[in-house]
Image: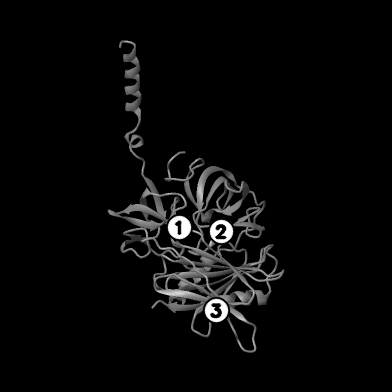
Amino acid sequence: MRKLFPFLAMMVLLVSMVPAHVLAETPMYYYVKTGDYNPLNLRESPSTDAAILVKIPYGARVELLDFYAGSTWANCTYKGYYGYVMTRYLSYDKPYPKPDPGPKPAPQPSGSLFVGFQPAYYSAIVRPSTPAGFVHMRWAPSKDQPIFQDYYAGQPLQVFYANNTWCQVYDPNTHVFGYMMKEFLTYVGPIGFGEGMVGDAQ
Amino acid sequence: MKRYAAMILTVCLLLASGAACAETVKLLEISPAFDLEAELPEGVTVEQEILNEQMTRIQVVFPGAGHPDYTLLISPSELYDDQMMADLTEEEIEVLFTEVAQEMQSPSYEVMTVEDGLMMMVVNEEAGSDYAYVITIYGGYFIQVYVAHEDYATLTQEEVAEAINLLDSIRVIPSA
């Protein structure tokens, strides 16, 4: 017992140094990002037939309770309301505010296509811009580059490198690398998070 | 209750006097409120697939080489509750175009209303890989025809017109 005491004391000391919020379940927050800046319906159950509990404004933050990668719906809470929202309208990053109407800036000439890429290493799911849409994977990070594969809502990919606009992605099912616009990818978790609850390690 | 589009296809031949024969493809159970029916040229084959809980994909393949692929995609929209495209304001139409054309290098669009009053938007990629979307919103459902060659070779006007015809041929049959 005397030999065990220092060990137990050390364990107690280590645990007490860990912040409480780490010990507790870490909440997952996402933001509402609708293409037309309209509010998003929070529904009673995961169906477009279900009653609308509240409309969540564009850019508002929600706390996810259940979110399975590839699922159409996520269970979440917003200002005391508990319900379901469609995952395709959620973004891990806070979206830009609705732009003021006015002249759009002229596109800037770009140099190399591969400027500004930094390591990223996360799992993501595809999020097309329209309900019946899909997203192109291209050979290089530019809209004028050839398309070689299309992806539908909820399909999982792994992001290896990213700049402000593009991601180099890897399809773990086809073992193919390509480039996809960052706008159409929703962060799920670090690489290694596969099927199952977002935030769970395999 | 989970909503998904369960597709049952029945094909029957229609005789059109003095014109090419057409096949009616009935798309059932898209919605509790209505069914869809499309008239397709004779000889086409149709492949259907339910992609996820919300979206159905129908691949329309024309016989012979050289035809582009026509993909019909149907999904309920959370943002267009029971709306038609004709219900959208000009600003909402502009936003819709921006959403559809986000991946295009040089997009253009045209909004048209066909004979039976259905409004649709044709969105074209004018540069690089050539492909086009013909879309409409019907009763809160987002219906889209995507047309492109397998190698994204340049589309002809006739090939884009075929996509318009395909969307235009869809008839809504209210459920009894």
Q: Residue at x 49, y 44 (%)?
A: A194
Q: Nearer the viewer, residue A11 or B175?
A: B175
Q: Are marks 1 and 2 on the same chain?
A: yes
Answer yes or no: is residue A105 visible: yes
| Quadrant, the N terminus of chain A | top left
Q: Looking at the picture, which amino acid does disc 1 mark? A: Arg
- Chain under disc 3: B
Please name the residue that numbered disc 1 is placed on.
Answer: A88
* SS under mark 1: helix
Q: In this view, which residue lies farthest toward the left?
A: A80
Within the image, what quadrant is residue A201 found in?
top left
Q: Chain of mark 2?
A: A
Marks 2/3: CA distance?
26 Å
Residue B86 in sight here: no
Residue B104 occupies which quadrant of the picture? bottom right
Q: Residue at x 38, y 57 (%)?
A: A85
Dots 2 and 3 on the same chain: no
Residue assigned mark 2: A135
Residue A107 placement (x, y as % from top left):
60, 61
Side (left or right) of A182 relative to B141: right
Q: Quadrant of residue B155?
A: bottom right
Q: Are marks 3 and 1 on the same chain?
A: no
Q: Is residue B114 above or below residue A185?
A: below
- Distance between the alpha carbons at the discs numbered 3 and 1: 30 Å
Label 2 crowd bin: few (<14), some (14–19), many (20+), radius 10 Å: many
Q: Amino acid at mark 3?
A: Ser
Camera-side residue of A157 and B105: A157
- Amino acid type indicated by mark 2: Val
Circle on res. B169: 3
Q: Secondary structure at mark 2?
A: strand
**SS assignment at label 3:** loop
